[in-house]
Amino acid sequence: MTVTTPDRQAVAPDKERAAVASAARPRSKGRIGRWLGSGLVQAFLVVIALIWITPLAGLFLSSLRSAQDTARGGWWTSLSSPAQLSFDNYSALLANAGMTKAFWNTVLISVPATVLVVVIAALAAYAFAWLEFPGRDALFLLVVALLVVPMQIGLLPVAKLFGALGLFGTIPGVVLFHVAYGLPFAVFLLRNYFAEMPKEMLEAARMDGGTEWRIFTQLVLPVGRPAIASLAIFQFLWVWNDMLVALLFADSSSQPLTVELQSQIRQFGSNIDVLAPGAFVSLVVPVVVFFAFQRHFVQGVMAGSVK
């Protein structure tokens, strides 16, 4: 019996090319890793981080100084004179009824607007991605078309509608406006993410007797946690930092922190001992929320990657 063997001269070049390619990839990766770990790159990243953190540090130090110290010099003078720093401004801020009420108004606006957008968008996105019903594609195209409608176009019609319904100048009115204009992007984002899930995974759950609600709550939501966490972060930041909608739709009893800070500037001019701590609190809360949701974001990525 004759056994044919492959031509060594024909096989050798292929093996050599594969060996060269496999050897080149680790060297290129190692070269990039060494370049990123070099002292020059690290020094550059430290400089960029300092540039980004300097305004926050300046705002924090300004919030700890009195109005007299601020009038005499910039916030950097407190680095050589730490005696200027105290928490008296924050004590005065807590005693300011207008600022504390505006802070809680901001919470009452931002939290419901974020929760409602995430819940409604997740339900609608699952329906658009995996449920069959008449007019599904046309309705989704309508949702996508709403993304190009500027928010400013709807301010006057919605204001008239809220006035007729008795919602103008109230916190529910501001929340409804943010929910209405946040849903198109939220549905578009989550629908595209849910549609990328393996179809076989959902079919296997249906074959095991799972209802659509159980599949949505126990399968789709855990796998879609990264997109949901990202949406919650961005929606909260948009609503918390908004001033245009609150300035138009909120009255003096329901205005959030951004409008209250703006009114402090208009009434008292350079009222830095109130503005600085108020602005720092308004800045810190979104940062805390971001890092809190970032933990869930990473957990969702790891959970979704396991099959």
Image: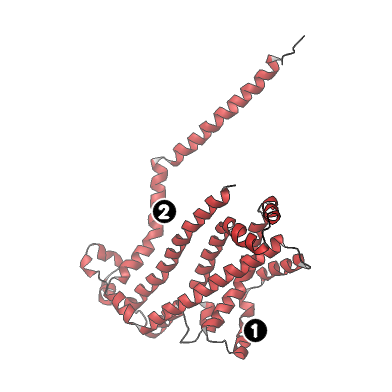
Residue at the image position 64 percent from the left and 69 percent from the top: 184
Residue at the image position 60 percent from the left and 71 percent from the top: 182
Residue situated furthest front in the rendering: 209
What count of labels does the image hold? 2
135 with respect to 42 (left or right): right
Task: Decide: few, some or many residues near mark 2? Use Cα within 10 Å; few <14, some 14-19, many ≥20.
Answer: few
Which residue type carries mark 1?
A: Pro
Residue situated furthest right in the rendering: 134
User: Which label number is shown at residue 18?
Assistant: none
Write down the quadrant of residue 66 in the picture: bottom left
Residue under circle 2? 48
Residue situated furthest top in the rendering: 1
Give the x, y percent position of residue 220: 62, 58
Write down the quadrant of residue 124 in the picture: bottom right
The residue mark sitting in front, 2 or 1, is 1
Task: Decide: few, some or many residues near mark 1? Use Cα within 10 Å; few <14, some 14-19, many ≥20.
Answer: few
Give the x, y percent position of residue 10: 70, 18
149 with respect to 66 (left or right): right
Q: 241 or 220: which is nearer to us? A: 220
The colour scheme is secondary structure
| Residue 148, above or below 300 | below
Give the x, y percent position of residue 35: 45, 39
Residue under circle 1? 157
Residue 75 in view in this figure = yes
Give the x, y percent position of residue 116: 57, 72
Q: Secondary structure at mark 1?
A: helix
Tell me the distance, in whole angstroms, between the alpha carbons under discs 2 and 1.
45 Å
